[in-house]
Amino acid sequence: MEIVIINEAKDKSIYRYKKDYELIFSKALNLLDRNINSCCSVIFVTPERIHEINREYRNIDRSTDVISFALQDEQDAFEIEEVEEELGDIFINVQAIRDQAKEYGHSNRREACFLFCHGILHLLGYDHMTKEEEKEMFSLQDQILDDIVKR
């Protein structure tokens, strides 16, 4: 398991979350019984950059907090063992970490971990387009995060 961190936002505070991200990634894979040696990239960006990405790739002309780009969309692709699977990229808006932590009344650490966990679940094939999908994905987020970082 490998997490590549790219700091396009030039925000030094993001490096403090690497160990949390490793725990989250490992717990997600174990909880979902995914026996894969996997890696992903986490790219920390500014609100302006994530706005550009959102507009270009999703046709949504506004900033957002996190965007994931999965390299594998088929669940069967996760059955391969002993080969490192590149799951994809997670783009996290560094300003959204601070703004949403304040809005929701929890720590920056909790918000940074929530956004990463949300992104990882997307890379692993989860979504929240329907009420049923949302309930499943958000329940998984709580199971993964609550032992690692308190609300």
Image: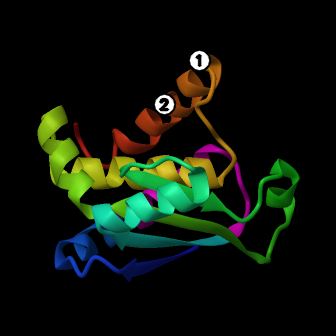
Rendered residue at 39%/58% (across/down): 51
| Residue 126 in view | yes
Q: Which residue is mark 1?
A: 131
Q: Tag 1: Cα neighbours inside 10 Å, few (<14), some, or many (≥20)?
A: few
Q: Which residues are magenta?
A: 20-37
91 is within the stretch colored magenta: no
Could you tell me which secondary element the residue under label 2 belongs to? helix
Q: Foreground: 8 or 151?
A: 8
**Of pointers 2 and 1, the one earlier in the residue sequence:** 1
Amino acid type shown at disc 2: Phe
Pick out the residue farthest to the top.
131
| Residue 25 pos. (x, y %) | 51, 59
35 is within the stretch colored magenta: yes
Q: Which residue is mark 2?
A: 138
Horizontal arrangement in the rendering, residue 43 relative to residue 16 (left or right): right
| Residue 23 pos. (x, y %) | 42, 60
Q: Tag 2: Cα neighbours inside 10 Å, few (<14), some, or many (≥20)?
A: some
Which corner quadrant holds the N terminus? bottom right
Rendered residue at 63%/22% (across/down): 130
Q: Foreground: 39 or 50?
A: 50
Rendered residue at 20%/76% (across/down): 11
Q: Foreground: 111 or 94?
A: 94
Vertical relation: 95 (above or below) 32:
below
Amino acid type shown at disc 1: Lys
Question: Separation of disc 2 and disc 1 at Cα?
Answer: 10 Å
